[in-house]
Image (cartoon, rainbow, N blue to C red):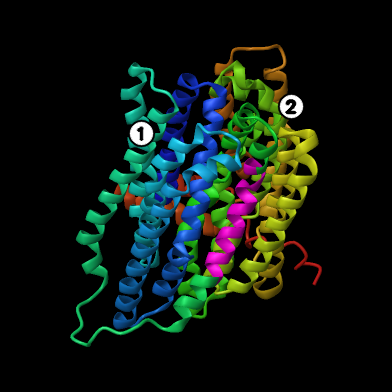
């Protein structure tokens, strides 16, 4: 819940910042900013070396206090060296990087953003440490929420000065730097509580940490290639204006991934702990339950972006960005599919299946690059959307096949498919009809809440609740500090007993 709140806060505040940036920048400048963020983001992943996830998995699995201290000490040291080296390299390589995209205006963008490479490496490492201790607050509230909030705040202040793309970049860099400072202060405060003192001399961590680091580094970089190769290749063959249209559509499509990303952050260490305790049954039930409720956030966005793309683009970005509506429809289908199948990658990471992560990411990345070079020169934005969509769909589906074969983990059960099908069957036509006669873009606001309410009602009407779902109610009762017996009695009417098995198990 904390992770989801942080992701929703980041989503809202990033939207505020992006809306401001889009309205003060030209489409060309917005495309240049997007290229800068995409490229430095890739370099940040390269410099992180997979340490964030490797440390999270190792700390969650490891019970020896001395080993935990060794993991933290060596992880922080390696990350600090990598951050300094890569930020310096990006700064001095800004000119050839800008020449790669045939745009000299990117030189100061890359130079300013070079320091964010180091900021994000260190921030991700600190967040990964606390992820291993199942503490999501640093990532959710600081790395995500505070960072996005500061970026939006700085842009609100700078908007009166009519800043160009460099002003937006300065705001982005400042927000990332302050967020890192806050994370360091949090670590100084909280980390001693997790690492108990021990008089034994310092030692090196076990080699499994570095094995996971290499595997996660390869997988994360390949996943990033899947995520951004199409955008970078589009920038090589088409002008920045096309990148601006595509980036606007992609930003909306990625919203559907926020719920799964929030879930994935905590699902990795929880899976590692459960598999270490020999409890795969709890992993299965947690997987399906959490995936179903993440869709409460995802389904409304899918209904809007898939069935009313032009209205959605106009509401968020303005009518100038309506040419990206067709790409949005293509992108959003794959994003929704990725949310529907659940936190596949983090589950595999928690189970220690690092090699599977690498080869599934490799297949997805190669697919994106091949389709991008084949389609983008001719079809531009639409070609990029198809390339990303096909590659992004392959990534979770290949991993899900492995989860099913190895541990019978799958979200495809009656309790997910039936209410989801009913929601789409009713909600899709309603959204199309509501936006058919060129209404005000503000209509998307009530339509969003309509989609969320429709999904929840569909769960109740189809009796798709299980006793596992009441765990969420128990968490809410603990937060409020009081029981909710009336709510509990009401929900019991809609529980299906026994809990629905995976599709196919009844036949077996």
Which residue was labeled with disc 2? 429
Query: Cβ–Cβ below 8 Å for labels 2 and 1?
Result: no
Task: Name the spot of residue 95 as percent of width and height, x first.
Answer: 50, 42
Query: Residue 171 shows which numbered tag?
Result: 1
Q: Nearer the viewer, residue 439 or 481?
A: 439
Q: Nearer the viewer, residue 313 or 9?
A: 313
N-term mark: 2 or 1: 1
Identify the secondary structure beneath mark 2. helix
**Above or below, 331 relative to 71:** above
Q: Nearer the viewer, residue 123 or 61?
A: 123
Task: Name the spot of residue 110 as percent of width and height, x first.
Answer: 46, 41
Q: For marks 2 and 1, give the CA distance.
A: 42 Å
Which residue is drawn at the image coordinates 74% and 27% (left, top)?
Answer: 429
Mark 1 surroundings within 10 Å by alpha-carbon count, few (fewer than 14), some (14 through 19), many (20 or more): many
Which residue is drawn at the image coordinates 42% and 40% (left, top)?
Answer: 10
Query: Image quadrant of residue 16?
Result: top left
* 220 falls in the magenta region: yes
The image shows a total of numbered marks equal to: 2
Magenta stretch in the rendered image: 215-232
């Amino acid at each position: 819940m904390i992770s989801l709140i942080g992701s929703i806060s980041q989503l809202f505040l990033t939207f505020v910042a992006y809306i401001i940036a889009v309205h003060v920048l030209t489409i060309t400048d917005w495309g240049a900013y997007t290229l800068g963020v995409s490229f430095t983001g890739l370099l940040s992943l390269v410099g992180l070396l997979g340490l964030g996830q490797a440390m999270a998995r190792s700390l969650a699995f490891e019970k020896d206090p001395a080993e935990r201290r060794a993991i933290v000490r060596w992880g922080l040291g390696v990350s600090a060296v990598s951050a300094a080296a890569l930020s310096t390299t990006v700064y001095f390589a800004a000119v050839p990087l800008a020449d790669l995209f045939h745009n000299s205006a990117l030189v100061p963008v890359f130079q300013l953003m070079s320091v964010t490479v180091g900021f994000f490496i260190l921030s991700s490492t600190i967040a990964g440490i606390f992820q291993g201790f199942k503490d999501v607050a640093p990532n959710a509230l600081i790395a995500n929420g505070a960072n996005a909030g500061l970026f939006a705040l700085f842009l609100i202040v700078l908007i009166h000065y009519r800043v160009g793309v460099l002003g937006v970049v300065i705001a982005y860099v400042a927000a990332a730097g302050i967020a890192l400072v806050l994370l360091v202060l949090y670590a100084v405060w909280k980390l001693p509580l997790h690492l108990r003192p021990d008089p034994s001399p310092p030692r090196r961590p076990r080699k499994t940490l570095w094995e996971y680091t290499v595997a996660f580094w390869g997988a994360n970089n390949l996943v990033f290639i899947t995520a951004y190769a199409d955008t970078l290749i589009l920038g090589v063959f088409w002008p920045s204006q096309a990148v601006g249209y595509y980036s606007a559509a992609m930003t909306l499509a990625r919203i559907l991934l926020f719920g799964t990303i929030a879930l994935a952050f905590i699902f990795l260490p929880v899976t590692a702990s459960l598999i270490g305790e020999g409890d795969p049954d709890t992993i299965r039930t947690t997987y399906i339950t959490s995936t179903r409720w993440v869709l409460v956030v995802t389904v409304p966005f899918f209904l809007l972006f898939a069935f009313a793309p032009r209205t959605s683009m106009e509401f968020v970005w303005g009518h100038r960005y309506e040419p990206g509506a067709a790409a949005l429809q293509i992108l959003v289908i794959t994003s929704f599919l990725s949310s529907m199948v659940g936190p596949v990658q983090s589950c595999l990471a928690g189970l220690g299946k690092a090699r599977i992560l690498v080869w599934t990411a490799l297949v997805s990345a190669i697919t994106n690059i091949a389709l991008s070079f084949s389609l983008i020169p001719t079809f531009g934005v639409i070609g990029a959307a198809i390339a990303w969509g096909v590659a992004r769909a392959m990534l979770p589906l290949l991993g899900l096949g492995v989860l099913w074969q190895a541990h019978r983990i799958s979200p495809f059960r009656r309790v997910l498919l039936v209410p989801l099908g009913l929601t789409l069957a009713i909600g899709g036509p309603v959204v199309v009809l509501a936006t058919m006669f060129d209404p005000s873009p503000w209509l998307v606001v009530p339509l969003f809440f309509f989609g969320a309410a429709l999904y929840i009602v569909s769960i109740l009407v189809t009796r798709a609740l299980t006793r596992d779902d009441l765990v969420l109610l128990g968490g809410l009762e603990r937060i409020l500090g009081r029981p909710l017996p009336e709510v509990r009695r009401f929900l019991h009417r809609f529980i299906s007993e026994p809990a629905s098995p995976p599709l196919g198990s009844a036949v077996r």
